[in-house]
Image: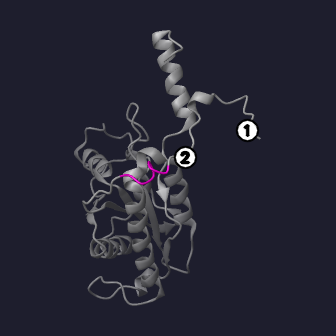
Amino acid sequence: MSDLPAAVDQHLKHPDIAALRPPVSTHKPRILILYGSLRAVSYSRLLAQEAGRLLEHFGCEVRIFDPAGLPLPDAEPVSHPKVQELRTLSAWSEGQVWVSPERHGAMTGILKSQIDWIPLSIGAVRPTQGKTLAVMQVSGGSQSFNAVNQMRILGRWMRMVTIPNQSSVAKAFQEFDADGRMKPSSYYDRVVDVCEELVKFTLLTRDASGYLTDRYSERKEAAEKLETLTGNKAL
């Protein structure tokens, strides 16, 4: 079972328990929240704000990005102020929450545009790799999971650590009071669960993120590129 002729032995590493238990950061977990609606009365924004309050209660530093004024992907250069604001917040964050309405059985283009403006890579750096992610959605009708399922796929594509729990709030117009606060309900309880879980996963992974995302294939590829540049196999 230990015969691995297709593998390059020098790049195979056994899991390092010490690397999984690095010194613990003491700053507050940094969480960015994105939501997918521009309506004056936006239930995804209200849910995002509710999540923000909970995350702050659990000891996080929270930023909520306002998508108003963000251009469609590729319609403006990346130097556009709203694009730079979004990218700066994404780089700052250690975890994120994505909240979308479900529209025509899918997440909204407003949220997708925000995600599309966040780069998969900048040179050798993958800005979202290893960050934690929680996904939530609101629906005008019965409970559905199309939007959160789509967001999970996107999170995986962005190499983010998407937590197991999620929230889907059905008939969202019934779940918030006149002040925009979420009413007590099983839906609210699930939102609490999601926020609590996100904080735990962020605290668990943020200091070991570099090690958790250190991969055999990338070590091998980097060595091959260096060999090509130097012509020295011993490196």
Q: Please give the residue where the numbered disc 2 appears in the rendered image.
A: 15
Q: Please state which of residues 84 and 16 is positioned toward the viewer in this rendering.
A: 16
Q: Where is residue 151 in the image (x, y as percent from the top left)?
A: 50, 59
Residue 105, visible in the rendered structure: no
Q: Where is residue 152 in the image (x, y as percent from the top left)?
A: 53, 59
* Image-quadrant location for residue 37: bottom left
Q: Residue at x 47, y 52 (%)?
A: 160
Q: Which residue is drawn at 37% across and 52% down?
A: 207
Outermost residue on the front side: it is: 18
* Image-quadrant location for residue 153: bottom right
Q: Which residue is drawn at 49% across and 41% down?
A: 214
Outermost residue on the right side: it is: 1
Q: In the structure shown, which secondary structural element does the residue marked by tag 2 occupy?
A: loop
Q: Distance between the residues labelled 2 and 1?
A: 16 Å
Task: Please give the label number shown on residue 154.
Answer: none
Q: Please give the residue where the numbered disc 1 appears in the rendered image.
A: 2
Q: Please state which of residues 163 and 235 is positioned toward the viewer in this rendering.
A: 235
Outermost residue on the bottom side: it is: 184
What residue span does the magenta drawing correspond to? 17-22
